[in-house]
Image (cartoon, grey):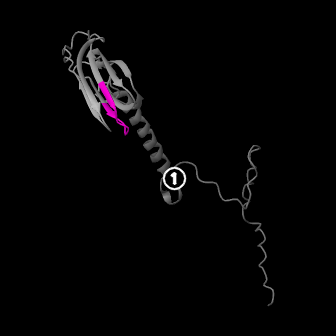
Amino acid sequence: MPPTEQPEPAAPDASAPESPAPESPAPDSPAPDASSPPAPTPGPERAGGRVDRRGTAVGAVITAACAALVLYGVFDTPQKRPAPKRPTAAVTYEVTGEGVADLTYQARSASGKAVVVRGVSLPWKKTVRVPLGKPPIVTITLDAKGGRATCALAVRGRHVQTATAYGTYGRATCQGELPAPESTTDTPVSAQGE
């Protein structure tokens, strides 16, 4: 293949006016490189005359989300008032006998949930505070070896009930009654209930 000839650049025309000399770059900026892409045009306008607003939209969404969270925290914070103390009464549970039993009893719990104790060696005794209006109760469940166990319940030192469990997995329950608390909203209620 024969080499192709390149046309030679045209000589400058003497009759054409001279163009002004290009300005030298600022001393701080690097010299322009012919291989580097042209610098983007300043401002929000891009090719085709369109304005790029994606960055502005994303920033606005993030700012609005942060503001919403702050306002939610300010307006949704309820005034935390301490729960009124519910009056209680002293209750003594006692289980006599020999061997091992599972016990369930009511203690100080406004929700009324019972306390479960497994594998208790007898005899066992416990004094707890029970909220007024909740029934004090103790339940015995003997193990596979069986035997005999008796529960006793006393409210404020006064005997209320006794029951006895016999044999394998024998069960007994002692239950009493506590008066309902007085429903007054203006005066504070004694935490002792006595």
Q: Residue 188's quadrant in the figure? A: top left
* Whether residue 44 can be seen here: yes
Label 1 belongs to which residue? Answer: 45
Q: In which quarter of the image is the N terminus?
A: bottom right
**Residue 51: x percent and y percent?**
48, 53
Q: What element carries label 1?
A: loop
**Residue 18: x percent and y percent?**
74, 59
Residue 59 position (above or below residue 71)? below
Q: Residue 147's quadrant in the figure? A: top left
Q: Which residue occupies the foreground of this view, 91 or 131?
A: 91
Q: Which residue occupies the foreground of this view, 35 or 14?
A: 35
Q: Badge 1: few (under 14), some or many (20 or more) residues near its Cα, within 10 Å?
A: few
Q: Give the range drawn in magenta.
A: 140-150
Q: Which residue occupies the foreground of this view, 141 or 57?
A: 141
Q: Quadrant of the C terminus?
A: top left
Q: Does the magenta stretch include residue 154?
A: no
**Residue 76: x percent and y percent?**
33, 29
Q: Is residue 145 magenta?
A: yes
Residue 130 position (above or below residue 144)? above
* Residue at (47, 51) in percent of width and height: 54
* Whether residue 114 can be seen here: no
Q: What residue type is labelled 1?
A: Glu
* Residue at (73, 46) in percent of width and height: 29
